[in-house]
Amino acid sequence: MKIREINTMRGPNYWSVRRHKLIVMVLDLEEIEARPSNSIPGFLDRLKTLLPGMYEHRCSVGTPGGFYQRVEEGTWMGHVIEHIALEIQSLAGMEVGFGRTRSYGEDGVYHVVFDYIEEKVGQYAARASVRICEALIEGIPYSLVEDIQEMRELREANRLGPSTGSIIEEAEARGIPWIRLNKYSLCQLGYGRNQKRVQATVTSQTSSIGVEIAGDKEDTKYLLQQAEIPVPKGEIIRTQSGLEDAVRSLKYPLVIKPIDGNHGRGVTTNIENWEQANAAMDNAKRISNSVIVEQYITGDDYRILVINYKMVAAAKRLAAQVIGNGKSNIKELIEITNADPRRGYGHEKVLTSISIDSITHKQLEAQNLTLDSIPDKDQTVILKDTANLSTGGTSIDVTDIVHPSIVFMAERISRVVGLDICGIDFITKDISRPVEETRGAVIEVNAGPGFRMHLAPAEGLPRNVAAPVIDMLYPPGSLSRIPIVAVTGTNGKTTTTRLMAHLSKLMGYTVGYTTTDGIYIQNHLMMSGDCSGPGSAEFVLKDPTVNFAVLETARGGILRAGLGFKNCDIAIVTNIAPDHLGLKGIHTVEQLAKVKGVVVESVLPSGYAILNADDDLVYDMRKEAKCNIALFSMDEHNPRIKKIMQAGGLSAIYENGFITICKGEWKLRVIKAVNVPLTYGGKAAFMIQNVLPVALAGYIRGFELQDIRSALESFIPSPAQTPGRLNLFNFKNFDVLLDYAHNPAGLNALKKLTDKMDGYPKVGIIAGIGDRRQEDNEGIGYVASTMFDEIIIRQDKNLRGRSEKEIIDMLMAGILAHDPHKKVTLYGTEREAITSAIEGALKGSLIIICSDVVPDALAQVQKYKEEEANTLYEFDKSEISKQ
């Protein structure tokens, strides 16, 4: 078996609009295609032995053991691999259950689709499941231990931490979109200008000065003392002699910690002698050169969490420990404790497993114990020197019993230090009593405090401490999203996108938009190239200046990774025509329509899908939509338009020469098509078709008709506003029209315009495309033969898997099918073809360049135009001088 490719879906996609996180593996079974599961002796028994948990996989049978039944009856290995990938992820602690296996459209090749929780783990599971299946087929022993551990480690290395994760989950629950900005915990909530950022529990609103103060124990302690907040007496030291002086002054027991550490790093508590003090100082100096020596305050360790200057939770923290049973030694007790199903590797579960390390041995030594010691029944043995959950500690929720005076003190501390989110470490014998009675003290103030102890305490009530963070970042009535208009279809996407961006910009928005030409922020080109995929969409949505997004959304990006956004406000679908068929497992226009339909299905319930009522495949997309539907049509008598008008819906039509918006049966005429430059005096019907949905989208957004009219009047088909889309250059003796038409449908639309244009002969420059079907390339040749008096065939820069001869033969087959005598000239490059056409142009001719690399072609034509202008200027100067 051979894995051809593994694609990772991260947004709404072809396989599921609701399940965004999917692995899509293209798997070639090769000779195994001829060996279904029931034809391989012992396969089912080996599968049951290795993966007994797969009994719970119901499969299409719908009952436990259903998948085993399918294997016994006979199923293909792609289906088996799908289930293995799901099961091994579950064994690694990531419960997943959605999967499907479908034909790729080639014999023995399949799409194997399954969901994942962590991307790297899903990709690993794809490869591992193939290895496992091959071993089961061959009867080779296979150990899952290494795979399971590798997946657990991948999860810990790549997952969001529990604190960040809880904030993201709360944001998702409220419909707030988010984007992960790096491989760590830096995340963006919201889009564009309405974005906020979080990293762990530090937000874009958190004071940097507050973070600095909290990170400097000396400054923190000084500010708290000045505010009459109880803190342990202590000294800052840097040398061995300084430590001696501090010990003499403060007396044992002591605490030694780095001056700028956090999360318990480098901290040693309950120091009782000089040897321990020396070791503690060495430990602290690994973190910082300056060290704090403090009195050790006796009592329990509490963490008080303050968010937006209000106490939201409090927990009693217990260092990792075991309780003796009078029988087991300490090592055995640790194993028993770690067997608690709530404990796991890293952050995968509520509690972390207790590890045995040098700190454990030191703690045991201080208690005159070893791992082989057998503690008395109910004897508590402390295993770590701090109460951090990440080292196996536990927490008990005490939020409801915190004394009001301590609540007041904690909230005041957050303002003294200047932190909107902080964790205050407090030592007291009883947190339900005033600090004056217990002689407790604040020992630390932490920026970026962990939430895990509050989200899932070992005892007591879990607290949703992420909720007040979101309340703070997005108070009631504030916006997290920006308007998103997504444009898809086969032809006309880029022009429609640019026109929509132009209209929105005129309405005062800072617009970010993506096209097959590049990414633009307010008409400034940020990135050139085909930028119609999910990464480009995220580029715009991450930009903090943008408050309106228009996103061209092409087939390739949807199939590669899904959409770059979860929801949009308006979706426009221009048309569906055969293009890119035979690629990525998409072989029919119906499948292509399903791919494009993902955009429609992503529209918010309050939003609109604007569909082409003249296109059956586009019109049918309304069946899967969960939003409002609006239609556009070139025919006001289209029954579908009549129906939506009678129902009181919204539509846009071309009637009596007008671009008209219909609200129910009321007609709101926007502008005559002849007055819209983009339509070339109303001659370019396909451009009118692009204008209609934009006018309708503007109306839906609440734009005034006069503003829509102004935008349509001021949008000029030119290299600046519509590069490569109907760019007309008037030379002295001939004209050049440059367009991106690259498939039979696009050429046919262009033909309807060029048939109305003067110019003879009409010379067309065309090319075939190596990764398109034979019938597509022959179709380009056939349409070109009907359009042009002469044809120049040039080659694409990228032949995409075919030879020049193969592509030319396909084009010629189409050309000759219409006109066996058509004049055809061949050139190796687009530059050579354009040079020949322009330099050999006859007077009155019209050269039509169907370009693939638009910037290069535009630059070449514009250079000729400039040279002609310079020549005419010099000629005029010469004539004037003669006078």
Image (tube, rainbow, N blue to C red):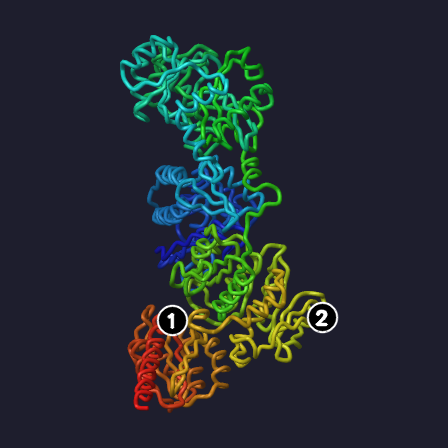
Above or below residue 448? Residue 128 is below
Above or below residue 122? Residue 861 is below
Residue behind mark 2: 665
Residue 49 appearing in the image: no
Q: Nearer the viewer, residue 672 or 590?
A: 672
Q: Is residue 139 left or right of residue 389?
A: left
**Image quarter in which the N terminus is found:** bottom left
Q: Which mark is residue 854?
A: 1
Label 2 vs label 1: CA separation?
42 Å
Say what secondary structure mark 1 lies in.
helix
Residue at (49% x, 69% y) in the render: 495
Q: Quadrant of residue 391?
A: top left
- Amino acid type assigned to the residue bearing label 1 in the image: Val
Percent across and percent down for residue 55 are 50, 42
Q: Is residue 313 left or right of residue 157?
A: right
**Image quarter in which the C terminus is found:** bottom left
Q: Pointer 2: residues within 10 angstroms few (<14), some, or many (20+)?
A: some
Percent across and percent down for residue 648 are 71, 65
Residue at (27% x, 18% y) in the render: 239
Percent across and percent down for residue 383 are 40, 19
Q: Say whether disc 2 or disc 1 marks the residue closer to the N-terminus.
A: 2
Above or below residue 362? Residue 110 is below
Residue 810 appearing in the image: yes
- Amino acid type assigned to the residue bearing label 2 in the image: Glu
Say what secondary structure mark 2 lies in.
loop
